[in-house]
Image (spheres, rainbow, N blue to C red):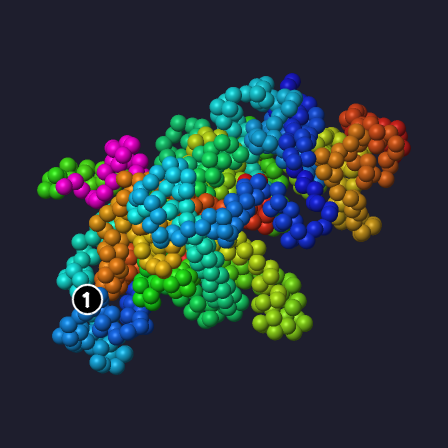
Amino acid sequence: MTDTPDYKAESPAREAWRMFRRNVPALVGMVILAFIVLATLYGTFFYSGDPYDVVWAPHEAPGVTPEYPLGTDYLGRDIMAGMLTGGGPTLAVGAAAAAITMVIGIALGSLAGFYGGWIDNLLMRITEFFQVLPALLFAMVLVTLFEPSLWTIAIAIGVVSWPQTARLTRAEFLRIKELEYVTAARAIGARNMRIMWKVILPNAMPPLIVSATLTIGIAILFEAGLSFLGLGDPNVMSWGLMIGANRDYILDAWWPVTFPGLAIFFTVFAVSLIGDGLNDAFNPKLRER
Amino acid sequence: MSSSYILRRVGYGLILMLGVVVLNFLLIRLAPGDPAVVIAGEMGGASDEMLASIREEYGLNKPVITQLGIYVGNVLQGDLGKSFFFDQPVSSLIGQRIGATILLVITAQILSILLGVFLGVIAARKPNGVMSGFVSVFATIGYAVPVFWTGIMLIILFASVLPIFPVEGMQSVRLRSAGGLTWALDVAHHLVLPAFTLAIIYLAQYARLSRASMLEVLGSDYIRTARAKGAAEKTVLFKHALRNAALPILTVAGLQFGNLISGALLVETVFNWPGMGRLAFDSILRRDYPTIMGVLFFASAMVVVANILTDISYRWADPRLRGKS
Amino acid sequence: MTALLDINDLRVTFNTRYGQVTALDGVSLHVNAGETLGVVGESGCGKSITALATMGLIPSPPGRIAGGSIRLDGEELVGARPSRLRAMRGADIAMIFQEPMTSLNPVFTVGDQIAEAIMLHQKVSHDQALKDAVALLDRVGIPSPKARVHDYPHQLSGGMRQRVMIAMAVSCRPKVLIADEPTTALDVTVQAQIFDLLNEIQRDFGAAIVLITHDMGAISEMADRVAVMYAGRIIEEARADDVLDFPQHPYARGLIDCIPALGREDHALKEIPGVVPPLHLLGAGCAFAERCEHANERCRREKPLLVNHDHHPAACHAVEEGRI
């Protein structure tokens, strides 16, 4: 079959955005995520309440008392208040951890891919070493050793998650540095730093953006897992903590664990729909699969 | 495949494990506070004699490099220190529990690969069919569900609505002394929910991966050759295509092993499964560092072993790599 | 006498994102036992689709045989049961592909792959099939076949792999052997060897060969008859000498002019301007009109039919009207 080339030239970013806009699941993801972010940012303006306050009888079922639409937990604390305040730390830690992951991963991966030789060898051995450590266990150890706070949790998640980003960055740098425009940049005497950051990195961005999106999802799951185990910041209510606190009473009341779990699920689900959408948008060829 | 390759691979694995030991050592030293107090853990104020004996055993009064030597030497002799909370050597604490973890992790791994690949192959037959859509949606959902929450939801379901599987522990109290087949069946019965909970995330990922991998392979020239020979569709799919599509699946299965152990940690906590994850959780709550470090060591060792096995089987499965270094 | 392979008015359509396109538009071909038919044309003209349709291997969806007939030894293949087609594929009609590097399965030995082809159609043991595979490898000129039979494809050169493909294709002594650009991916010296081998095989096995190529040199060396294809249609058909010496259709003339001939006065090679038009953009007129210096209004309006002219059949208004 002869395939006609599209004659209209379009910048890759524009084309990606056009593809992304047409991707229904990705748009659904955007809507879900926007709703969750808005609810955690502004929800308390419309629905105030301290998630730590015991306000009512324990284990009030959802929908029974209008003041507490999602019911109360084993102590009689308002679940709706927990839902609205518990998302903030989860999202913040997720975003911060993903940022830390990307910074470490891109820095090490680009050095390894660009310079090759012993630098590549050393950095890849370090990467392999970090991949041997089971991430959640390692993060648990780090958090316990260095006192849990939102920052230590974000850093711990970043420290255990970067190897995959580093490998991806390295592979992209290895691929791109052989291309003509990099040779051209070298030929006009551009310095290594300039070639790395101004020439190669922008062209490596599409897969890295997809990876960053998926990293946010993984980081949110991580934070939820740590909080669930009781290793989160004890002074901050979060969805994972709500599940962990109520898990001894799940057979008495399903709602205190179900709603925060759904919130985590929908957040990660939305993020990964967006990630898949970006992936499709950057790789139009794969869409036909 | 050359045995020198296997030896080299094992040697590299041992170096990685040495790295884990050094990391453990550094972590304790980097933690804020007196290392002796850190090692003693939160025993509600360790006695001076106890701290002194810890300093003696770990050589904490000597230079740091000597301390490292002592620590590495102890580990080499199988001495991972002593848990002051459990009042037992760490190695025996872990020895009692590592089997349960291995059972859970391996079962989940096999379950997820078999089911995932099967779903993926079926979906790949019709890239735009119902099954393909299901696999894509299921994969995205499976990826997004917190594993501990899946476990809790299954406990609620199977404890109250459909009580056919036990939701806690590894064996029934009344069968504790039973032997042989009864015991094995009882453990298998208890294993169903934890293994399924753990498998579901990876099952979804393997389904998606094997669908993509199969689609790529099915478009290749040698599949057309197989059809041109007159091979039946089943042969084309499961012999010619799957043997090639399995290669990336094998790679991912090796890489996922560390994540699987992380997941097992949460699943063991939820289902009260008496493995290393449960032990890690208990010891972290008590800041029982020798035990935590021991768990980290053994869990990493499991990943190293899994990686070596993956590399070896990959070389076996791909003739193009045999005989190369 | 009916031909061994007789393709009549074959139509194949594909569903694409531009809508349904007609990849083959009424193709008729035949080839007799022991004969070699050359099918020539640029890439995208429908040569390979014709081959795949004959093998019953049109990827469906998106493709589909929309009409016409393909008869092998009198038996209709269009609409035949899949199991019947499967039994004939590899046994009565076999195919050699363009890319020997990728047409063999990388994870099985070449011996196993040849043996599989034998065992699919004959009731023999694996041991016997492997022995046959050794004999076949020997027959196609692979040195030390007993050792090579245990090799994996990546251990062989491109020429050797194409010999393996040929061995596999002739393993069940097919009546018709379709060779789709069998030498395009190979070095020039190896190309000649493969053509020699195909000629020998044909002598020994008596198979009819359909040689698909864009290389007129290969045609002059191999083919008894030639069919020239353009945009899914046959536009000229005749004995190989006739087409080479007296091409009628302007496209066929262009193809002949592309051959670098020794001793020809003008050493500058001619090129046919333009490219094969995308199938979804084909209009009502002659598909070649856009690239043809002789095209007039009628050419752009009305599709020429394949009719007999002075020498042999060609589908061209200009030839019919005596303008060229």
Return the residue found at the far left. Answer: B177
Residue at the spot 51% in from the left edge and 24% down from the top edge = C82
Q: Amino acid at mark 1?
A: Gly
Q: Which residues are magenta?
A: B154-173
Quadrant position of the N terminus of chain A in the picture: top right
A286 within the magenta span: no
Residue at the spot 15% in from the left edge and 75% down from the top edge = B48
Q: Position of residue B87 (x, y in %)?
A: 14, 62
Q: Position of residue B44 (x, y in %)?
A: 19, 66
Q: Is C320 situated above or below B272?
A: above
Q: Secondary structure at mark 1?
A: loop
Q: Nearer the viewer, residue C54 or A2?
A: A2
B163 within the magenta span: yes
Residue at the spot 42% in from the left edge and 51% down from the top edge = A49
Residue B196 appears in the picture as rendered: no
* Residue on which the image places disc 1: B44
Q: Is residue A158 shown left or right of residue C34?
A: left
Q: Is residue A114 shown left or right of residue A81?
A: right
Residue C15 appears in the picture as rendered: yes
Q: Is B76 situated above or below B199?
A: below
